[in-house]
Amino acid sequence: MRIAMIGTGYVGLVSGACFADFGHRVCCVDKDGSKIEALNDGIMPIWEPGLESLVKANVGHGRLTFTTDLQSAVEGAEAIFIAVGTPARRGDGHADLTYVFDAVRELARFIQPGAVVVTKSTVPVGTGDKIEQILSEEGIEEVSVASNPEFLREGAAIADFKHPDRIVVGAEDPRAQDVLREIYRPLFLNRAPILITGRRTAELTKYAANAFLAVKISFINEISDLCEAVDADVQDVARGIGLDNRIGPKFLHAGPGYGGSCFPKDTLALLQTADAAGVDQRIVRTTVAVNDDRKSSMVERVVRALGGDPKGKRVGALGLAFKPNTDDMREAPAIPIVKALVERGAAVCAFDPVAMSQAEQVLSGIQFADDAYAAADGADVLVIVTEWDEFRALDLERVAASLRGKILVDLRNVYDPGEAEEAGLTYYGVGRGRPRG
Ligand code: UDX
């Protein structure tokens, strides 16, 4: 198959590289000339495990190319995937579809009859209908429009793409269904379930999946607050409920709230869709509110650990990215937490294994350390914000020796409280019994 992938962000680049690895000929196109130039030099715009070698191998085999020239990418392509950004519009949370619609208007000039336009970007219900309308306004009738949402987790995106729990294809037109079946054929051979459904249903499925996972996280975060009040352990509660197959063990880790490029944006966009449809979604609305409050309650946790006033105190922060194995700082809980501590007079020294240059762009007035121990050095409290693997096996005695305050606030429940206390630290986790003090 010949595939054009419009947009070389997270979704476009990973999907393009994986499709090429399936044996298709993929041309990725982006307006950002410097990004394309870098990709042609083998430099990745994002940090994602395995991506660089996958891209290089497929470029080497001649199956994957990068260009700024839309015409050369789209002409002759049997499928044109749209993977441009759909940021939340400032103020109202609506998904901004400007880039999607601009891309459709442009590709209309070069698309061949019989081709399929596929949305991979997360787009609100009805976007496929609008794309069809734009194409028809541009005089294009002989193409079909399908929805094929992605369910990739950053940091595990390639594995998720190649071993998906399911593939969702939204297309009423049998020709579009056939093209997408053919594109994903290598995965059917591995028995990945494929759900072929209506286009609007596929569009909504993506939002419903992300909203449900966000609900799970906010649920366990609220349960963790209850655990602290009644002296129970949220880790064991999560395990105890997660072993029930109907609930499942995943996305039940209590922490500082969800962040990233998807959950915060997609929950808000779902609420906008619901408002427009005149149907209230109280569970998702509450989930968003619980998650918003979570960050300030984490700040209070650190402040309490410091004895009530962070002014003049030194805080070491471990992990800044919204989750491990990514340099992505979008909606990272670290941002409001660190900012609030700085505003209240604390001096913050942070370390993240890969996200520090991204963090520098969104966090000012803090210091950056060279490693975890340097962040702890002389601090009154050490706060684990993101659970990078390298923070899981710190020499706690060394940490305790270098800390001034001997306090560990573990917002990801990485450590066993007993072990931390044995090393001489006062330990505060999340939802692990009644907190001291
Ligand atoms: C998510 C979805 O998982 C993916 O299917 C979708 O297509 C894009 O959005 P991603 O944003 O990369 O992927 O990260 P994910 O691993 O889902 O984590 C999202 C956030 O939830 C992170 O901030 C993470 O720390 C938090 N989280 C996750 C928890 O706080 N607790 C959990 O149990 C799981």
Image (spheres, rainbow, N blue to C red):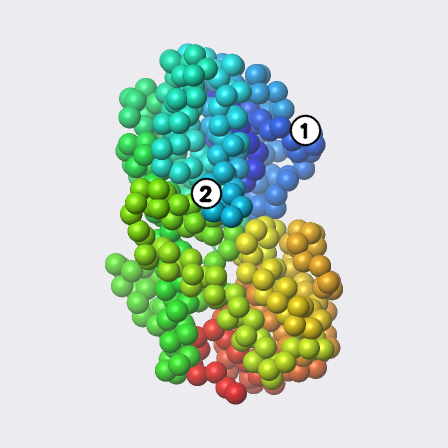
Which residue does the numbered mark 2 point to in the structure image? 94
Percent across and percent down for residue 30 are 60, 29
Residue furthest bottom as drawn: 437
Q: Amino acid at mark 2?
A: His
Where disc 1 sits, the SS reads: helix
Q: Point out residue 103 in the picture as x, y percentages from the top left corner.
A: 52, 25
For residue 432, side relative to residue 323 (left or right): left
Q: Residue at x 44, y 77 (%)?
A: 432
User: Mark 2 or 1 closer to N-term?
Assistant: 1
Q: Callout 1, which amino acid?
A: Gly
Residue 33 marker: 1
Is disc 2 placed on a helix, strand or loop?
A: loop
How packed mark 2 is, by other alpha carbons closer than 10 Å (few <14, some 14-19, many 20 or more), is many
- In depth, the one of 161 and 97 nearer the eye is 97
Q: Is residue 36 above or below residue 262?
A: above
Q: Position of residue 149 (x, y in %)?
A: 40, 37
The answer to which image quadrant residue 145 occupies is top left
